Image: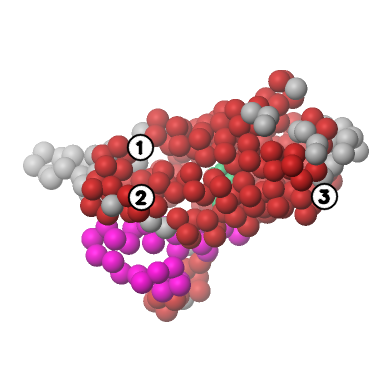
Amino acid sequence: MPVEEFVAGWISGALGLVLGHPFDTVKLLGFFKGMSFPIASIAVVNSVLFGVYSNTLLVLTATSHQERRAQPPSYTHIFLAGCTGGFLQAYCLAPFDLIKVRLQNQTEPRAQPGSPPPRYQGPVHCAASIFREEGPRGLFRGAWALTLRDTPTVGIYFITYEGLCRQYTPEGQNPSSATVLVAGGFAGIASWVAATPLDVIKSRMQMDGLRRRVYQGMLDCMVSSVRQEGLGVFFRGVTINSARAFPVNAVTFLSYEYLLRWWG
Ligand SMILES: CN(C)C(=N)NCCC[C@H](N)C(=O)O
């Protein structure tokens, strides 16, 4: 199994994250300020995403990453490989994403003289507290919604990227840096616009259980969110998700492509 794609995914995910971090921090004003935890987690998750995508395409089409410009895979194969990558990354992402959401939503003010310490004092403390208070399964709270969010939308991510690259690249050639940047940016936006409704539900499921359980399950969360806030609830955060997605995924795809060309 070729491993370069896993390593390239690892490095490119970390680079994309550095650009995306300010957006992640303002999305929910909170306590989540450090970089080491998100870098470590996104690197692992992106490595699984790109590694599984590329190796699934290898199984489906018998072409390596280097051969794919001369023998482009069909969009059906790209979509299926993307969905497989999205499905597997969701399971690796689930505990990291839960910790991120819990820390971001922590609204207690930063330590002021006399104020009680925040409930979670950092990522490791947060993981240990969830494990202790909600059990090992607690670390996977919201994983179903995350899987439903990521499986089709990562398919959309790779289809958009490949479609735009093919549109603006002469046959058989590698896309230019500008094309990779634009295609990567729009792939990020397309996938996040599609992912936002389930992203809202996922975050609510992850916060559920912190004090008392509010929702019976994912469907109940959807229905009560729409009842209380209207259909607009599914588009909450779509603008900031898209604004973050363009630079993050432009840089992710550019570094991924260049690392593979450099090693290839
Ligand atoms: C849930 N969605 C939209 C995705 N997983 N999209 C594909 C990768 C996105 C990239 N790691 C990012 O953080 O923007």
Considering the whole magenta stretch, tell me its main secondary structure. Answer: helix
Circle nearer the N terminus (2, 1): 1
Would residue 206 be counted in the magenta stretch? yes
Label 1: few (<14), some (14–19) or many (≥20) C-alpha neighbours in 10 Å: some
Mark 1 or 3, closer to the camera? 3
Residues drawn in magenta:
193-222
Quadrant hosting residue 174: top right
Up-down relation of residue 211 to residue 224 (above or below): above
Q: Nearer the viewer, residue 3 or 191?
A: 3
Residue at image x 69%, y 38%? Answer: 55
Label 2: few (<14), some (14–19) or many (≥20) C-alpha neighbours in 10 Å: many
Q: Is the image coloured rainbow, by chain, by secondary structure, or in one colour? A: secondary structure
Mark 3 residue element? loop
Classify residue 163 as left or right of residue 1: right
Answer yes or no: is residue 16 visible. Answer: no
Measure how far apart labels 2 and 3 are at the Cα level. Answer: 37 Å
Q: Nearer the viewer, residue 220 or 116?
A: 220
Mark 1 residue element? loop
Point out which mark residue 74 bears. Answer: 3
Given contact means CB atoms under 8 Å apart, are the residues at marks 1 and 3 in contact? Answer: no
What amino acid does circle 1 point to? Lys
At which x and y percent is residue 221? 41, 70
Quadrant hosting residue 148: bottom right
Point out which mark residue 33 bears. Answer: 1
Q: Which residue is mark 2?
A: 139
What amino acid does circle 2 point to? Leu
What amino acid does circle 3 point to? Ser
